[in-house]
Image (cartoon, helix red, strand yellow):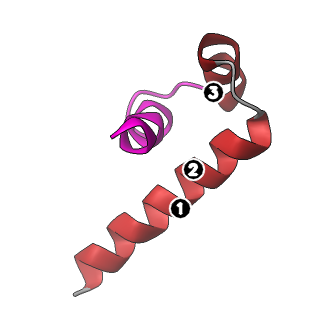
Amino acid sequence: MRNERIHEAVMEHGYTLTALQKYLGLRLSTLSRIAKRIGEEKNARNKV
C-alpha cells in the first residue's frame, strides 16, 4: 500500500522524490526503486 501511494504521489500528483524523501525519511534510491517497480507492475497488469 505504501509503495503504491509513493508511485501515485510521483506520477499523478507531481511530487518530487526529494520532497518525498524529506517527508518520509527514505533514501532517494529507495524511493526511485519503489516508484519504478510499481510502475512496471502496473504496466504489466495493463498489458494482459
- Find numbered disc 1 in the image and state the secondary structure of the residue it sits on: helix
Relative image position of residue 31 (x, y in whole percent): 65, 40
Which of the two discs, 2 and 3, sits closer to the camera? 2
Q: Is residue 5 within the magenta segment?
A: yes
Which of the two discs, 1 and 3, sits closer to the camera? 1
Spatial CA span between label 2 and label 3: 13 Å
Q: Nearer the viewer, residue 14 or 25?
A: 25
* Whether label 1 touches label 2, CB < 8 Å: yes
Residue reaching furthest bottom? 48
Q: Is residue 6 within the magenta segment?
A: yes
Name the residue beneath numbered marker 3. 16
Q: Label 3: how many residues lie within 10 Å, few (<14), some (14-19) or many (20+)?
A: few
Spatial CA span between label 1 and label 2: 5 Å
Relative horizontal placement of residue 24, taking residue 10 as reference (left or right): right
Name the residue beneath numbered marker 2. 34
Bounds of the magenta segment:
1-16
Name the residue beneath numbered marker 1. 37
Residue 33: image quadrant is bottom right
| Relative height, residue 1 to residue 40 (above, below) | above
Please state which amino acid type lies under the numbered disc 3: Thr
Relative image position of residue 44 (x, y in whole percent): 35, 78
Please state which amino acid type lies under the numbered disc 1: Arg
Looking at the image, which residue is at 47% across and 35% down? 6
Residue 9: image quadrant is top left
Looking at the image, which residue is at 57% across and 50% down? 34
